[in-house]
């Protein structure tokens, strides 16, 4: 099954590949090593950059297929899909990996339909067995894990951010850059505007290494500031439980759980969150879980690595102070 | 204006799902089945479009076993006009691609201007079907929409699509496929009158042969369904809050190396 593992590049829309692309390339490198294949990046952008191309080489891509065209921005799946499908038709890659992001989620789904192959969306692990790839994906919002395999290549999958490790960057590795000619079809969709969220200065929830999250125990929207102060000190994103979102304390994009975002940071700290099954589903793959809750019977303590039974209004500011002291050293 | 809404029946979010005897599917015993929460936003939005325009028809469609009729009844009770049930043992092991192909075929027969989905069904969490239906139909699509306004002349729709760090507002010509994100609206509860009325509304059964779909092998197969690996036992830090906080920060730094 020697063949190319393609990784679709997720960039910052300004010519720089994002961290999740290093994670894709890292996992593809490990799988290619086991199966005798090799790793290539596919970058669709209105404008790429030399630094970006170099970066992809250092992250493990031996070749970059660069599709650079003004019509590729903003992202529209109806434009990107035929372009990647045409290239895949010519090059017959073994696998095509994308990231679980707003763009690539759509791209890979459409691509799977166009190529008539299976898609393992939101995968969290892979294994090569008897020349076949087996993907592990959480189902029922992470209450169970499903292992699935493909009937035929290319094996399409999207990979959850923050789960797969990047390889050590290979300093000075230079990828072969190909600029294939593929048809770019006109789009029927017109971008009217892009509304940026007010910058919080905090990382994005699904990309953050550390997440601080608040629930009903916060008693009101105004008290999230307590968690924001802690988050600022440790560079965390701030999330919320469904109870807090449904009460209107936080916008839905901050909701963690079965009807919100699924996260797996290095460190998750829940404050005033009891741990309803649908919330646990969204965060139980976090590496370290900390829970602070007044109720010693709160279900979240069952999966927590560290727990403090206590009043979050007292404990959270103390933690902020302690972290400040530690990190200032 | 005709609108099709595709829904899926899934286990309730509070259900503790268990692995079935074949270790490839779940044990259906004791499960409370609901309309997938994101699909409720889709149904609600379709009803609002119809109500705002003062005309039109909302058709709900699902693919699933006999019990999935309950989900269709719920949508009819919310106010949808009629329902289509893709109900055939041939679809028992259907993967997202097979489901998408079947839905695309029935949508092609219905010929709506607008198709709504939820952003994903909360059972297999694949989130691919709405986009794949759009691909099979050759229509534009936008997923995870937070706002939607159909133009007065019904030629296009303006949508706000949730992306990392913000929203992208697009104008899309009709017909198109949209998938609903939480926050799009607040779904209504069926009224008693709605529930009574739903009993008289049509639910049409459709077989694979009715859609001209032949046998087509699955593209994905389940190797196994597994429980989560247990997490190591945790540690409760007791004592004075200040001491507990101090010990927690030390542990996170020195033992867990998480900070």
Image: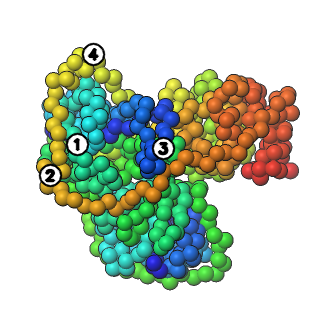
> Residue under circle 4?
B192
How crowded pointer 4 is (Cα within 10 Å; few <14, some 14-19, many 20+) is rated as: few
Answer with mark 1 or mark 4, whichever residue precedes in sequence. Answer: 1
Number of numbered discs on residues: 4
The residues bearing labels 1 and 2 have C-alpha atoms spaced at a distance of 11 Å
How crowded pointer 2 is (Cα within 10 Å; few <14, some 14-19, many 20+) is rated as: few
In the picture, the disc for residue B19 is: 3
Answer with mark 4 or mark 3, whichever residue precedes in sequence. Answer: 3
Query: At which x and y percent is residue B26?
Result: 44, 43
> Residue under circle 1?
B87
Answer with mark 3 or mark 1, whichever residue precedes in sequence. Answer: 3
Answer with mark 1 or mark 2, whichever residue precedes in sequence. Answer: 1
The residues bearing labels 4 and 2 have C-alpha atoms spaced at a distance of 37 Å
Query: At which x and y percent is residue A215?
Result: 60, 30
Instruction: Please give the name of the residue rendered at 31% of the width and 52% of the height, measured from the top-left corner.
Output: B94
Instruction: Please give the name of the residue rendered at 47% of the width and 73% of the height, measured from the top-left corner.
Output: A131
Q: Between tags 3 and 1, which lies in front? A: 3
Tell which subunit mark 3 falls on.
B
Tell which subunit mark 1 falls on.
B
**Does the residue at mark 2 contact the one at mark 3 (Cβ under 8 Å)?**
no
Instruction: Please give the name of the residue rendered at 69% of the width and 28% of the height, measured from the top-left corner.
Output: A293
């Amino acid at each position: 099954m020697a063949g190319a593992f393609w990784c679709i590049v997720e960039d910052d829309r300004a010519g720089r590949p994002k961290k999740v692309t290093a994670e894709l390339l890292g996992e593809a490198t490990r799988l290619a090593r086991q199966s005798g294949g090799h790793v290539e990046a596919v970058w669709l952008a209105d404008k790429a950059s030399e630094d970006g191309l170099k970066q992809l080489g250092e992250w493990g891509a031996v070749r970059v297929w660069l599709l650079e065209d003004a019509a590729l921005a903003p992202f529209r799946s109806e434009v990107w899909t035929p372009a990647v499908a045409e290239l895949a038709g010519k090059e017959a890659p073994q696998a095509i990996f994308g990231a679980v992001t707003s763009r690539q989620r759509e791209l890979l789904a459409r691509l799977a339909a166009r190529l008539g192959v299976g898609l393992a969306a939101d995968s969290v692990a892979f294994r090569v067995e008897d020349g076949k790839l087996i993907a592990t994906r959480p189902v029922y919002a992470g209450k169970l894990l499903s292992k699935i395999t493909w009937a035929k290549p290319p094996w399409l999958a999207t990979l959850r951010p923050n789960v797969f490790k990047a390889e050590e960057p290979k300093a000075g590795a230079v990828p072969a850059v190909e600029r294939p000619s593929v048809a770019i079809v006109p789009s029927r969709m017109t971008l009217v505007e892009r509304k940026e969220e007010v910058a919080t200065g905090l990382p994005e929830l699904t990309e953050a290494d550390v997440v601080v999250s608040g629930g009903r125990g916060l008693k009101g929207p105004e008290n999230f500031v307590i968690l924001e102060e802690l988050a600022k000190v440790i560079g965390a994103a701030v999330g919320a439980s469904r109870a807090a979102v449904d009460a209107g304390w936080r916008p839905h994009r901050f909701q963690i759980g079965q009807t919100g975002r699924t996260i797996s940071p290095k460190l998750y700290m829940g404050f005033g969150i009891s741990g309803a099954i649908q919330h646990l589903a969204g965060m139980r793959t976090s590496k370290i879980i900390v829970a602070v809750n007044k109720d010693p019977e709160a279900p979240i303590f069952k999966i927590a690595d560290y727990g403090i039974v206590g009043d979050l209004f007292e404990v959270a500011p103390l933690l902020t102070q302690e972290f400040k002291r530690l990190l200032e050293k | 204006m005709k609108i099709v809404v595709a829904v899926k029946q899934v286990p309730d979010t509070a259900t503790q799902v268990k692995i079935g005897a074949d270790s490839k599917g779940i044990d259906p015993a004791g499960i409370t089945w609901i309309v997938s929460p994101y699909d409720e936003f889709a149904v609600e939005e379709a009803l609002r479009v119809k109500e705002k325009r003062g005309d039109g028809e909302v058709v709900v469609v699902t693919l699933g076993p006999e019990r999935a009729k309950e989900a269709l009844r719920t949508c009819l009770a919310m106010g949808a006009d009629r329902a289509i049930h893709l109900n055939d043992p041939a679809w028992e092991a259907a993967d997202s691609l097979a489901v998408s192909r079947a839905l695309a075929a029935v949508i092609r027969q219905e010929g709506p201007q607008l198709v709504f989905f939820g952003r994903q069904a909360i059972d297999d969490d694949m989130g691919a079907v709405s986009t794949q239906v759009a691909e099979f139909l050759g229509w534009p699509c936008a997923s995870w929409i937070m706002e939607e306004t159909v133009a007065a002349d019904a030629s296009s729709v303006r949508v706000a699509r949730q992306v990392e760090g913000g929203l992208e507002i697009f104008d899309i010509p009709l017909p198109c496929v949209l998938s609903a994100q939480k926050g799009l609206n607040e779904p209504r509860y069926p009224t008693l009158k709605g529930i009574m009325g739903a009993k008289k509304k049509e639910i049409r059964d459709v077989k694979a042969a009715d859609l001209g779909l032949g046998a087509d092998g699955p593209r994905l197969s389940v190797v196994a369904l597994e429980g989560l690996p247990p997490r190591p036992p945790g540690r409760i830090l007791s004592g004075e809050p200040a001491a507990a906080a101090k010990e927690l920060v030390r542990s996170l730094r020195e033992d867990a190396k998480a900070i």
